[in-house]
Structures are given as C-alpha cells and as structure tokens.
Image (cartoon, rainbow, N blue to C red):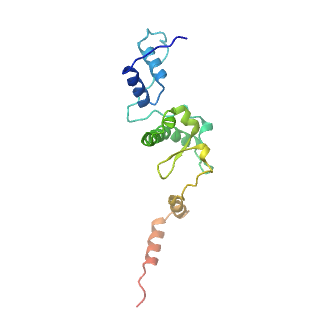
Amino acid sequence: MTELIIHEPLASRIRTLAAQQQRQPEDLLADLVERYAPDSHPQRPEPPIYPEYIPRPAESLTDDDIEIPDDIEDKEDYRRAARALAPKLYEIAREYWQEVGDEEKLALTDAQLDKLFWLIDPYGVPRFKHEKGTIELPHDPLEDFIGLIDTDDTLLSTRVRETMNERYKKPDS
C-alpha cells in the first residue's frame, strides 16, 4: 500500500469539506476519483440528488437500531420517520459537540451514530444508548395532555365548554 501525501492548505480544505458532508476524507476522495475516472461502471446508477436543505435519510439505520415503543401500531411508518429524522438529530448533536469542543464525538460518522445515538435531552445534550438508565429525564407534560384528550368522547369541544363553564361558574346570588 502506498501513502499519498497531501500538503496544507489542500489537506485542510479536504478535511473541512468532509466534515461539512459528515464523511471521512478518504470517502470524499474516493468519490472524487470515481467521478473523474474513466467510466468503468456504466451500469451503476447515479445516486439521487438531495438539495442541501433536505438531509439524506439514514439508510444505514437498520430495523434493529430503531427502538419502537410498544404502543406504535404502524411500525414501518415509524421506522421511515426515524430514518428521516436521524440526520437532523445528528446535525443538532454535531453543533452541540462543536460548541463544547468534543472532537471525539464530533468525528463520529452517521453510520456510527446509527448504532450509538439515543436522543437529545430537554437541555439540548445529545445522549447515547448506553446512557439509558443512568440519567433521569424530566416528566413530559405532553404525556399528561395526551391522557386528557385520549378519550372515546367524540364531542370533546362540548366537554371542554362544559368543564370551563363549571370551573368559572358564577355563584348563585
């Protein structure tokens, strides 16, 4: 194996571009060589073009990597949503790691994060799966709200009006 020496400032530009694309510099260079090499793979289709504002879905996120809550009925739809959301969460996580100067976590690839990443806590701190059970997340008030409206009553607006009238009822004079 032969090593290729790339001098600064070109090496710095390659590292910066790779980090922006959340890729390893070697992968970026391999794609560059593939693009400019004689067409040796005519049957290989071009990858789909994603505008910069639409992140590429996390295609390496396997079904085993996605933990589905028991109460979810449409599991495929949940997996599809998880794959679409993952790159956005990774971007937020990387912004946090950039701010705090955590180079080790900042260097993680999307494929590595697919295996390790859990959530971003309410304080904006990215958390990994191995942290489950070691940190206590605050109670989610939306769960209480869902419990209030999760009813068989189809006339919920009527119930709300009745409750409000009862609550703010003027005392009999």
Viewer-nearest residue: 9 or 64? 9
- Which residue is found at the position 43% from the left and 39% from the top? 98
Instruction: Tell me: residue 56, above or below residue 5.
Output: below
On screen, residue 149 above or below 170: above
The quadrant where residue 37 appears? top left
| Percent x, y of residue 123 | 47, 52
Residue sitting at 38 percent across and 32 percent down? 52
x, y percentage for residue 139? 54, 59
Q: How many marks?
A: 0
Estimate the x, y position of residue 124 in percent, counting from the top left: 46, 49
Q: Is residue 40 visible?
A: yes
Could you say which is closer to the camera, residue 160 or residue 95? 95
In the drawing, does residue 91 fall left or right of residue 113?
Answer: left
Instruction: Specify the quadrant of the image occupied by residue 77.
Output: top right
Which image quarter holds the C terminus? bottom left
Whether residue 1 sits left or right of residue 46 in the image: it is right
| Residue nearest the observer in this picture, 20 or 153 | 20
Q: Position of residue 57 (x, y in %)?
A: 48, 34
Question: Quadrant of the image for the N terminus?
Answer: top right
**Is residue 67 visible from the viewing direction of this image?**
no
User: Is 11 placed left or right of 58 in the picture?
Assistant: left
* Residue sticking out furthest to the left: 9
- Who's the residue at 53% across and 62% down the image? 144
- Please, which residue is most extreme toward the bottom here? 173
